[in-house]
Amino acid sequence: MRLPPYVLTSAENVLREIMRFTAPADTTLSHFFKSHPKLGGRERGAIAESVYAVLRNKAFFTDRAEAGAGGATMRRLVLLGMADAVGIDALPGLSEEESEWLKRQLEIDRSLLHKSMRANMPKWLFDKLVEQYGEEETLALADALNTPAPLDLRVNAMKTDRDAVIAELATAPIVAEPTPFAPLGLRLKKKPALQNLPLFKSGAIEVQDEGSQLLAQILGAKRGEMVVDFCAGAGGKTLALGAQMRNTGRLYAFDVSEKRLSKLKPRLARSGLSNVHPVAIAHEKDAKVKRLAGKIDRVLVDAPCSGMGTLRRNPDVKWRQDESAIAEMHEKQVSILDGAARLVKGGGRLVYATCSLLNEENDAVAANFIATHPDFELVPMSKVLAEQKIAGLEMGDYLKLLPHKHQTDGFFAAVFERKPMAKPAKADEE
Ligand SMILES: C[S@@+](CC[C@H](N)C(=O)[O-])C[C@H]1O[C@@H](n2cnc3c(N)ncnc32)[C@H](O)[C@@H]1O
């Protein structure tokens, strides 16, 4: 069935705003939908999907749209996005010329394109990835990053188990399969609205990428421990950690953003957890952090990062940043990790994690930490995965999840253990 003609104009308007790259695409889209309450579900879906298709394919689509004759470039860009998202047959009011042009563009064999255009990335990012992964793997990685992510769920083990959730979803009917690595993960075949399901309202499920679930798991938080989620944000990993601790012990959720922490509150209420303590801090050296120095069993630093591992969901991120932003991130990450490390007690663990694919934000931060913190040692990821009984992931020192290999977002993690504190000498004790 064809979409109504105003869908194309709406998509054009919102895309024009998003392509100024002054705000995240999902924020602009959600403002747009709020101010256009009459748009129906199918129309909203088509607008959002076409905008994301343009952002994923921007290098190629812009080249094609600019080369096209007649009419405005922005309309051609939207036509390419819409055709990609919903198919040419659903597009309303195309002139014969537009229809022919669109068909020709969709028939282009993209494997013959220049490599960085095929990867649909800014050149600086493509070059960085090629340096790290080589050209062939970068293209495979780019293909995966330019494909929409599946919808993953985490089952809240405090409330139910995976088999029971699969059975209840099937009555909706929603098809879900266990994720390959995370023991509480489910992957859905489609992207149904979940908010009104009793499973969601009761906190039995949360939406969470399998990679994020694994990051929380490798912290290895146990019952009764003192744990800090240093960059908790809206608490995706906090909720997983709290359940892992079986709602015992004390789990501090720190973040510098009160706004993000406030989004944790309703999720906490649904989850049934009462061991979580959200704390807004001013910065990583805040007195609230210092007060807990040397007292914490496990600290997770899910650091702010470029987010290049999440391009399947946030394709605008690659167009909104440049190389200088990555260098700034590195400095910030080093400082946050240093601040968080003070919390860890002797024998305790510190996990540094990002959703970036770039060495500067990952290996380089971990290497800097080890070089400047002789009281910590690296725990090889192969050992951590074995401890957690996570099978099927071949890792060396670090966790490196890659969309084209593991079907997760791109994630990095390093685990450090603080050496036991030296006992005070006898004379000191006396
Ligand atoms: C990758 S996000 C965290 C996502 C979250 N852990 C989750 O699973 O949903 C990084 C977070 O770090 C926070 N942040 C930035 N600077 C910080 C700092 N100096 N100390 C603590 N948190 C910080 C940001 O506000 C942001 O919420």
Image (cartoon, grey):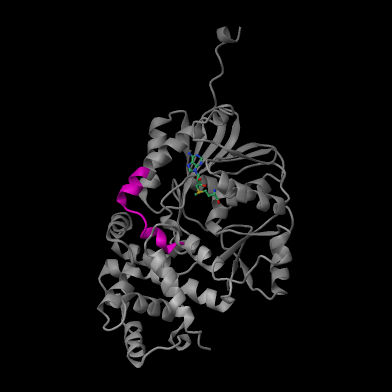
On screen, residue 24 versus residue 195, left or right, reads: left
Considering every residue shown, the one lying at the far bottom of the view is 96
Identify whether 288 is placed above or below 175.
Answer: above
On screen, residue 363 versus residue 196, left or right, reads: left
- The quadrant in which residue 129 appears is bottom left
Residue 20, image x, y percentages = 37, 62
**Is residue 364 visible to us here?**
no
Residue 355, image x, y percentages = 46, 53
Residue 39, image x, y percentages = 56, 75
Q: Judge by depth and name the residue closer to the eye, 29 or 244.
A: 29
Q: Judge by depth and name the residue closer to the eye, 140 or 122.
A: 122
Residue 430, image x, y percentages = 61, 6
Identify whether 289 is placed above or below 48.
Answer: above
On screen, residue 303 versus residue 16, left or right, reads: right
Q: Residue at x 45, y 85 (%)?
A: 91
**Is residue 349 highlighted in magenta?**
no
Question: Which residues, given as a range, are shown in magenta?
Answer: 314-328
- For the stretch drawn in magenta, the main secondary structure is helix
Q: Residue at x 54, y 71 (%)?
A: 36
Q: Residue at x 43, y 86 (%)?
A: 88
Q: How many marks?
A: 0
**Is residue 98 visible to us here?**
yes
**Is residue 318 highlighted in magenta?**
yes
Q: Judge by depth and name the residue closer to the eye, 296 or 90.
A: 90
Q: Residue at x 56, y 48 (%)?
A: 260
